[in-house]
Amino acid sequence: ELSSHGVVGERLTRSEASQPLVMFGPGGGAVLPMIRFHTCTAAKDDCEVIILNKAQIPHPARAHIQLTLVSSLLMKVRLLAFQDNDLAMEAAPLFDIVVLEAGDVVTREGDPAEDMFVFLSGRIDVRVKGGEGSDVTVGSISSHDDGASVKGTKLVGEGALASSKGAKRNASMIAADPCYLMRISKSKFPALLALSPGLPQRCKEAQAMLTLSNMARKAADDQQNFGRLLNYLEKYNDTSIDHVMRSGARSGDG
C-alpha cells in the first residue's frame, strides 16, 4: 500500500500477462523529492509488481517521469480546461515544482505580478497591510479547502495572467506549513495560452466569483453582528438606553 502524503522513495510497475505494463506512482521516480498528494494504492487481487528504487532509475528517465507527474496534476486544474493528456504534457515543461517551508514567501503585496502558481498541498496564509502598516491575515489556502486540494487543484496568483501589464500583487502569500506548488513565469504565459486560449477570461470570471463570494460572506457576517447588537439592546429597557444616549450627548458637548 502507498500511503497518502508519505515521502516517496519508490516507483512501482504492475505487470499482467494479458496487458502491457502499467506504471503508477510516478512521484517516486521524479527528480525532486516528492510526496504522495492524494494517492492511496492498495492491491485488491493477487498482483505481480516490480518495485524500482529511485536510485535505480536513470536521471533522463526521472526527468520524463517528473513531466508525466506534472502533466497529470495539470489535468486536474479546472481553469486550464485541458481536454486530453497530450495538451497537459505539452504544458508540463512550462512549470517548475516549488517546495516551500513554513514562513517562506510566495508573493509579497506591492511586488510586480510576474508568475502564477498551481497549489498542490500545505497551507498558505493570505495577508494584507493593515491600517498601521502591520500584516493582517485575511484568509488562507489549504489542502482541505474545496477546490484547493489536488483532487480539484487550483491556480494561485492568477491575477498575474488576468491583469494588465505592470500589475502589482494586492496581497502577500506566506507558507504557513510545508507546501508544494508548481510555478509558471510570466515569460511563459504565451506558450500556456496557446494550449489553453480561454484561460484569461476564465481567470477573470473566477476572480469575479471570488469577489462576490467574499461580499456575500461579509454581508452575512454584518447581518449576524447586527442581530447580536439588537439582542444586546433588548436586554435593556428604554430608560437605560435613553440614559446611555444622554450620557453620550453630554460627553460630546464636553
Image (cartoon, rainbow, N blue to C red):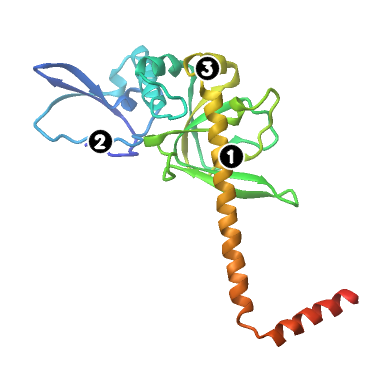
Q: For the residue marked with disc 2, what is the amino acid? A: Leu
Answer few, some or many: residues within 10 Å of disc 3's Cα (few below 14, many 20 plus, some between 14 and 19): some
The N terminus lies in quadrant: top left
Extreme front residue here? 238
Q: In which quadrant of the rendered view does residue 114 lie? A: top right
Mark 1 touches mark 2? (CB < 8 Å): no
- Please name the residue shown 75% across and 52% down the image: 132
Label 1: few (<14), some or many (≥20) within 10 Å?
Answer: many
Left or right placement of residue 160 versus residue 86 in this view: right
Residue in view at x 76 percent, y 84 percent? 243
> Sequence-wise, which precedes: disc 2 or disc 3?
2
Judging by the rendered image, the residue that carries numbered circle 2 is 2
> Can you tell which of label 1 and label 2 is closer to the viewer?
1
Sort mark 2 into few (<14), some (14-19) or many (20+) by Cα contacts within 10 Å: some
Relative image position of residue 94 (x, y in whole percent): 49, 17
Q: Mark 3 falls on what kind of element?
A: helix
The residue wearing badge 1 is 173
Q: Which SS class for mark 1? A: strand
Looking at numbered disc 3 in the image, what kind of residue is underneath it? Leu
Of the two numbered discs 2 and 3 in the rendering, the one whose residue sits closer to the viewer: 3
Type of the residue with mark 1: Met
Q: Is residue 141 above or below residue 67?
A: below
Asked if disc 2 and disc 3 are in contact, CB closer than 8 Å, the reply is no
Which secondary structure, mark 2?
Answer: loop
Q: Residue at x 11, y 28 (%)?
A: 47
Could you say which disc has been placed on residue 193 in the image?
3
Real-space Cα distance between discs 1 and 2?
31 Å
Which sits earlier in the primary sequence, circle 1 or circle 3?
1
Q: Quick one: quadrant of the C terminus?
A: bottom right
